[in-house]
């Protein structure tokens, strides 16, 4: 529990609203690029020519800015983006600057505009649906600047968009939740009730819920999914309050899609000896014995691959690539913590569901337009 409290403190600092200046960190690799590529995703919509060979900076390296509409230390989404950038700097020899614009939306446009207007970067990367209204006008104003936009899509000739089928991995998380709540595993109860807590009531958050509820219902057709939304992604105290309320109503497994707010869900589940499901990265080790698994959105992998393709002059613009289970864009964390909590028969159901989704035999519910 001590480790979880420490991480929650980091989450509070990382997700606070009071620092919206260009708080930046630079990550630069001196090594030359090596061929470490995976096959690029082929599920693209739209057609365009691949990018021209990117210009080099004064050191002969490709220069990249990663502008986060949040802060590092969330043990989830933004840390994952940063890992992809750091890996690219280390393995590909690109120069990367990470700009933390904070969670206060007032700081996002100045941070992104400053990076673009400087003319210092061959590629500017930013992401999440709330950034669309910021990126769109800037991309139009600077048509010669190349952008990668992740976890959302914008149609523009100078933007390469990446979306993730989070509903697919969430379906697997739902199978876990349904399997646990209907089992006799210690910490579960006789009620067939599970929970979902989102940071905000947004389409992308509800896409997680859609897959989660569908997956759970394949195991327990009459399962009840309690649903609550916080007021944002940086309030662990509210996350704990919402989770406590759901546990009081019988939920013995809660899936949090709430950033730093989700640390409070973990605290409540640990204190009440129930179970939780993490999000975005493998959070299982944050609360061993409590977090049964994590629905992973592999932002790090997708950004590394995008940077690699850009550096090689092979990244297409004016397209949206959708990455699901088959492409490795999303996954379920299946480690020793998962195996310790989730019974073997439930794990077998998860494996069967994953294979069926990849094979196209299961159509997963979504709240997003195709």
Image (cartoon, rainbow, N blue to C red):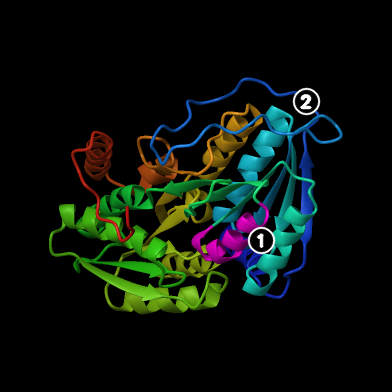
Instruction: List the residue tagged with mark 2.
Output: 31
Residue under the point 13% across and 64% down: 222
Is residue 296 on the magenta stretch?
no
Instruction: List the residue tagged with mark 1.
Output: 71
Quadrant housing residue 217: bottom left
Quadrant housing residue 289: bottom left
Q: Is 359 displayed left or right of 26 in the figure?
A: left
Residue 369 in percent (x, y) is at 32, 57
Q: Give the secondary structure at mark 1.
A: loop
Residue projecting furthest to the left = 221
Residue 199 in percent (x, y) is at 47, 70
Q: Is 15 displayed left or right of 295 in the figure?
A: right
Which of 33/344 is in front? 33
The span shown in magenta is 128-142
Q: Earlier in the sequence, mark 1 or mark 2?
A: 2
Task: Count residues near mark 2 (Cα–Cα under 10 Å), then give few for <14, some for 14-19, many for 20+.
Answer: few
Residue under the point 32% across and 68% down: 195
Residue 260 in percent (x, y) is at 55, 65
């Amino acid at each position: 529990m001590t480790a979880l409290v420490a991480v929650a403190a980091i989450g509070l600092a990382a997700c606070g609203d009071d620092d919206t200046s260009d708080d930046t960190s630079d990550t630069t690799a001196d090594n030359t690029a090596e061929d470490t590529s995976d096959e690029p995703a082929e599920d693209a919509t739209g057609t365009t020519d691949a990018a021209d060979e990117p210009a080099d900076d004064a050191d002969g390296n490709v220069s990249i800015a990663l502008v986060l509409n949040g802060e590092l230390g969330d043990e989830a989404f933004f840390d994952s983006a940063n890992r992809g950038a750091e890996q690219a700097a280390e393995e590909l020899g690109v120069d990367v600057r990470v700009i933390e614009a904070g969670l206060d939306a007032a700081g996002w446009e100045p941070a992104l505009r400053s990076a673009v207007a400087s003319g210092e970067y061959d590629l500017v990367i930013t992401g999440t649906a709330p950034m669309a209204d910021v990126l769109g006008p800037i991309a139009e104003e600077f048509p010669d600047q190349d952008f990668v936009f992740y976890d959302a899509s914008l149609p523009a000739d100078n933007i390469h968009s990446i979306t993730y089928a989070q509903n697919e991995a969430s379906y697997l998380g739902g199978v876990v939740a349904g399997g646990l709540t209907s089992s006799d595993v210690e910490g579960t109860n006789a009620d067939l009730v599970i929970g979902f807590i989102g940071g905000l009531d947004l389409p992308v958050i509800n896409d997680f819920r859609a897959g989660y509820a569908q997956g759970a219902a394949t195991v327990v057709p009459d399962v009840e999914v309690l649903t609550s939304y916080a007021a944002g992604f940086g309030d662990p105290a509210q996350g704990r309050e919402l989770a406590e309320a759901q546990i009081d109503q019988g939920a013995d497994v809660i899936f949090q899609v709430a950033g730093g707010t989700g640390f409070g869900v973990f605290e409540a589940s640990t204190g009440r000896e129930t179970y939780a499901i993490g999000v975005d990265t493998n959070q299982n080790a944050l609360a061993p014995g409590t977090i049964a698994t994590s629905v992973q959105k592999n932002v790090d992998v997708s950004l590394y691959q995008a940077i690699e393709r850009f550096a090689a002059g092979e990244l297409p613009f004016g397209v949206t690539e959708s990455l699901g289970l088959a492409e490795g864009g999303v996954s379920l964390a299946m480690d020793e913590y998962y195996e310790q909590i989730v019974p073997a028969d439930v794990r077998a159901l998860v494996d069967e569901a994953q294979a069926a989704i990849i094979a196209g035999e299961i159509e997963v519910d979504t709240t997003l337009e195709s």
